[in-house]
Image (cartoon, helix red, strand yellow):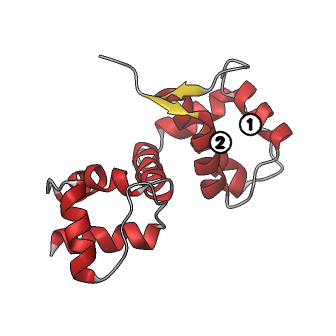
Amino acid sequence: MAMEKYPLDWLKASCEQVYCHPIAERTWRKWLRLCQVPQYAREVVKEQAMWLLTLAYMKKLEPNKKFTLFQIKFKLSGNPFAELHLAEAIYNACYTNAVGKDLPEIILRVTGKQVTVRTLYRWARKQQVTFKASKRLSRPEVEQWIRWAAA
């Protein structure tokens, strides 16, 4: 089984959502060191992603407290929702960086319906909106497409 990996720049954005603040570069480097992420890594394995998201959550509650990896792991072991948070963060990230050509994949994941890009162009004409495969989509736009797919 291949290990799931997550891009670090995406993970930082997800941690910022959990933390509810931008994370300074220096702080981010400290967090990465604490969570045993190799210095020049561009992506992390699921376990490290969980640690970082958990750290962001703990720092949100107690911003000035210093945490150890042991405390993070302990918090995680007592928190069955951590996996759920990661799943949610991944789901949100799919939304926030989506372009038109990603829509069939997102619609399939959310509704179980298979649609082609061609179908999306047809729906766009019907709904009188513009659709481009290369266009960045906002989260409300993605949600609107999902509602049309589910209808």
Seen in the image, is 118 located left or right of residue 45?
A: left
Tell me the SS state at disc 1: loop
Seen in the image, is 150 located left or right of residue 141?
A: left
Q: Residue at x 44, y 47 (%)?
A: 90
Q: How far apart are marks 1 and 2 (CA)?
A: 8 Å
Q: Estimate how packed mark 1 is, as few (under 14), some (14 to 19) or many (20 or more) residues with alpha carbons within 10 Å.
A: some
Q: Which of the marked residues, 1 or 2, is nearer the chain's N terminus?
A: 2
Taking 88 as reference, is 8 above or below it?
above
Between 36 and 135, which is closer to the camera in this rendering?
A: 135
Q: Which residue is drawn at 55% across and 27% down?
A: 44
Name the residue type under label 1: Phe
Instruction: Say which quarter of the image contains residue 132.
Output: bottom left
Q: Which mark is residue 55?
A: 2
| The C terminus lies in quadrant | bottom left
Name the residue type under label 2: Leu
Between 36 and 59, which is closer to the camera in this rendering?
A: 36
| The N terminus lies in quadrant | top left
Q: Residue at x 73, y 19 (%)?
A: 39
Residue bearing the label numbered 1: 67
x and y percentages locating residue 26 in the rendered image: 85, 38
